[in-house]
Image (spheres, helix red, strand yellow):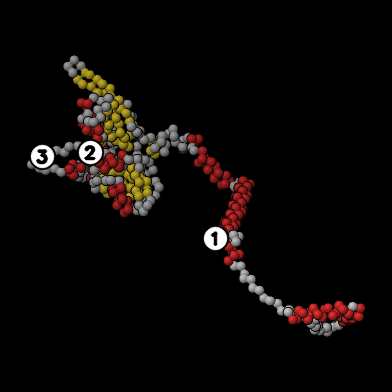
Amino acid sequence: MATATGQPPAKEVGSTPVIVEGTTTLYAHTLIAPITPHQTIPKKPLTYLHGEPKIVWEEEEIQQMIINEKLQYAVMGKFSYGWLDIQELRRLIPKQCDLKGEVSLGLVSNRYVLIRASLLEDYVNLLSKPQFYITHNYRSYPMRTLKWDPLFDPKKETTTTIAWISCLSLPPNFFGKETIFSMAAAVERPLQVDMATQNRTRPSCARVKVEMDLLGDFPKRINIGMRKKPGEVEKWVVINYDYVLKYCRSCKLQGHNEKDCYIIHPEIYPQEENEEEAGKEQEQKGETNHQGEQKEEITNTLEDNAKEKKDKGKKSEDIEFKEQMGRSGYRRGNYNQRRKPKQVWNQKPNQERNAKVDTKNQFGALEEDIEAAQKHNTEQEHKNPKVADIQLELGARTIKQ
């Protein structure tokens, strides 16, 4: 079976443990990672290359280092948009990522967290999902999982990932786990089969989860054969890759390749973002005319908005005043009817027509008019004595009444 670089061969999920007679085994024991002996690594002599110190270890020694440090199922968690305190991550990640075995976490850098899982099942679960969301205090922090590598560099994402492959038109007699793993080794390290393949409920194809290198060659088919006495019988089995991530060799990031890289091809950058960047460049160059026009437009719009707000405020006040008038009955007759003044009849005393009115004329302004009136009255009495008698009779009658 082929293994990834820097990783020792691991036990597959669901493999049947060896049962010894006279002993009892539990299901929990089958999930525990195989116990490997701790071996000490001898000291290496120090050499110099161009005057600088250098030490080289063998591949077997690197694998033994991984076993000694319990890094067989190590995964890197990458937080691109903020992260929590390491104590909170140690408490939340095992629960929210549904990890069944023992897990130890440590902060590698500002964005990367090293997750040491003890079960292959947890290792596969962490790398199978494209992204996890760690929620805390009504806020979620997205976390991407990457395979840990002995020469891990925070500036470069690893080229190793996990993907599903399907062996199409595979005969049913090749559905055994060992047989499928033998064929999947042509791609890379097989991890587990899906439930339909394990239960033999889908005889059309067999699916295997494989740990593969994104920069490696992906075989499209595999030749299987059977030896007989006259010769061999061969059959080609097509390998279908369900979904494989892309890798950019210039950016050293997963998710895109060189054709879709914005650094190599800036012309394919989205137009909206290009316009925003162009606007920022113009502001940095200091185009005062354009900025002045923008300021005028902004001020005009602000003034218009202020006027509209004032008009709306006046309209709202008028509407509220009308509503109040309607509630109080204004202009409906109720207001005047409720507060109509009472009519009271006050009789005025009758004044005598011949009553003399005393006037005090200090400055003698009306003496000429008074004298002229007296002369006129005396002349009329001498001319018509009957008129004076009639007036006296009428005045006496009114006094009696």
Quadrant of residue 176 within the rendered picture: top left
Instruction: Residue 350 in the image: state x and y as whole percent.
Output: 73, 79
**How many numbered discs?**
3
CA gap between label 1 and label 3 equals 94 Å
CA gap between label 2 and label 3 equals 20 Å
Quadrant of residue 24 within the rendered picture: top left
* Residue indicated by mark 3: 20
Report if the CB atoms under discs 2 and 3 are less than 8 Å apart. no
Circle 2 Cα neighbour tier, 10 Å, few/some/many (<14 / 14–19 / ≥20):
some
* Kind of residue sitting beneath label 3: Val
* Residue indicated by mark 1: 327
As helix, strand or loop, the secondary structure at mark 2 comes to loop
Circle 1 Cα neighbour tier, 10 Å, few/some/many (<14 / 14–19 / ≥20):
few
* Kind of residue sitting beneath label 2: Val
As helix, strand or loop, the secondary structure at mark 3 comes to loop
* Kind of residue sitting beneath label 1: Arg
